[in-house]
Amino acid sequence: MAKEVKVKVEGKVVKVNHDIYVVEVTLSNDKTATIEAHVSGKMRRNIIRILPGDKVVVEMSPKDLTRGLITYRM
């Protein structure tokens, strides 16, 4: 089995939900869509906080484009 390729997209954090590790991100590609994203494990371990207005890089699976994983905060 081949490993599936992740889609990397830049976006902006719109809202931080009640759980600090789940945020809503507006993507900056052609379609402006709001997705639900989780913070990656390395960012949790190093206590990197995500605030509304931050620019982030989100990795998404090509199978489900409504959820993602935040891997980098700019």
Image: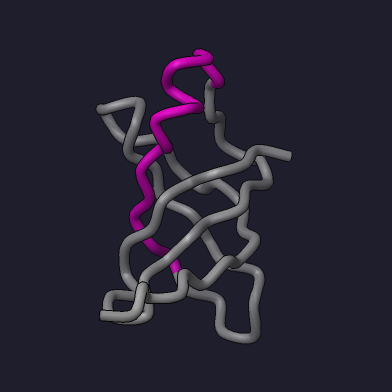
Look at the image and say whether residue 42 sits in the magenta stretch: yes
Where residue 28 sits in the image (x, y, percent)? Answer: 65, 69
Q: Residue at x 38, y 62 (%)?
A: 35
Where residue 18 sits in the image (x, y, percent)? Answer: 26, 28
Residue lying farthest bottom? 30
Look at the image and say whether residue 32 sits in the magenta stretch: no
Q: Which residues are magenta?
A: 34-48
Image quarter (top left, top right, bottom left or bottom right) of the C terminus: top right
Q: Residue at x 62, y 47 (%)?
A: 56
User: Quick check: 44 left or right of 55?
Assistant: left
Q: Picture quarter containing residue 64?
A: bottom left
How many marks can you see? Answer: 0
Q: Residue at x 50, y 14 (%)?
A: 47
Residue lying farthest front? 1
Q: Picture quarter containing residue 53?
A: top right
Where residue 51 sits in the image (x, y, percent)? Answer: 56, 29
| Residue nearer the viewer, 22 or 45 | 45
Q: Picture quarter containing residue 1?
A: bottom left
Where residue 27 sits in the image (x, y, percent)? Answer: 57, 66
Model colouring: one colour
Looking at the picture, does residue 55 appear above or below residue 39? Answer: below
Q: Residue at x 46, y 69 (%)?
A: 6
User: Quick check: 5 left or right of 65?
Assistant: right
Looking at the picture, does residue 7 appear above or below residue 70? Answer: below
